[in-house]
Amino acid sequence: MESPESQALLREYHIDVSDSWYMLHLGRPSTPAEIEEGLADSPSDDLAPPTGLFLVGRYGGTPAGCAGLRVLDPRTVELTRVFVRPAHRGTGGGRHLLAAVDEAARGLGAERIVLDTRLDLTGARALYTAYGYTEIPSYKHGPYAEVWYGRELGPGRGAGTATGGAAAVGRHRGR
């Protein structure tokens, strides 16, 4: 989580979702102070073993996206911090990330993945539903949790898995 590329992706993720929220509600992008406050209020330290993990997706060897998993209980992990850099959107990177998330979740012993998101993040919601996530009842509350999704993991590789391709995903464990 402390690698420069992980930190850069987390910052870009936060700026992306923060700017979207501020534009929707206040008609302007986030300020640098709001970005720093949001990062401080939303730490990602638990996205490292033994409480979770952080994946970095690469396109042509360059960091292009990320996703985090947080262990909620022995059977369930929470998907969080899903982000694909704008230049790489539309390349299948999101589906590659979700396929890697499935494998990583199985590696943590999970049988189910849950997540929360905002209603205005329509691209993310479309990706989740296309990948097989379905709406579930609220499993937690938060200021930005407006809709909740879940997906049972079957054995083997997920429906969104592709072999080959330009995307590769690597785990970042700690430093």
Image (tube, rainbow, N blue to C red):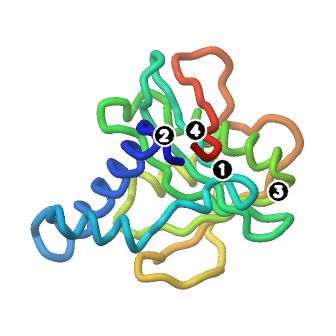
Amino acid on which the number 1 mark rests in the picture: Leu
> Does the residue at mark 3 contact the one at mark 2 (Cβ under 8 Å)?
no
Which of the two discs, 1 and 3, labels the residue nearer the N terminus? 1
Residue 53 is marked as: 1
Residue 16 % position (x, y) = 29, 54
As helix, strand or loop, the secondary structure at mark 4 comes to helix
Above or below, comparing residue 145 to residue 11 in the picture: below
Residue 170 falls in image quadrant? top right
Q: Give the alpha-carbon distance from disc 3 to disc 2, as whole Å.
A: 26 Å
Q: Nearer the viewer, mark 1 or mark 3?
A: 1
Image quadrant occupied by the C terminus = top right
Q: Dot 1, crowdedness within 10 Å: few (<14), some or many (≥20)?
A: many
Q: Nearer the viewer, mark 3 or mark 2?
A: 2
Q: Nearer the viewer, mark 1 or mark 2?
A: 2
Q: Dot 2, crowdedness within 10 Å: few (<14), some or many (≥20)?
A: few
Which of the two discs, 2 and 4, labels the residue nearer the N terminus? 2
Amino acid on which the number 3 mark rests in the picture: Ala
Q: Give the alpha-carbon distance from disc 2 to disc 4, as whole Å.
A: 19 Å
Which residue in the protein does label 4 denote? 97
Which of the two discs, 1 and 4, labels the residue nearer the N terminus? 1
Which of the two discs, 1 and 2, labels the residue nearer the N terminus? 2
Q: Nearer the viewer, mark 2 or mark 4?
A: 2
User: At x 86% / y 36%, what residue is drawn?
Assistant: 156
Residue 141 % position (x, y) = 54, 84
Which residue in the protein does label 2 denote? 3
As helix, strand or loop, the secondary structure at mark 2 comes to loop
Amino acid on which the number 2 mark rests in the picture: Ser
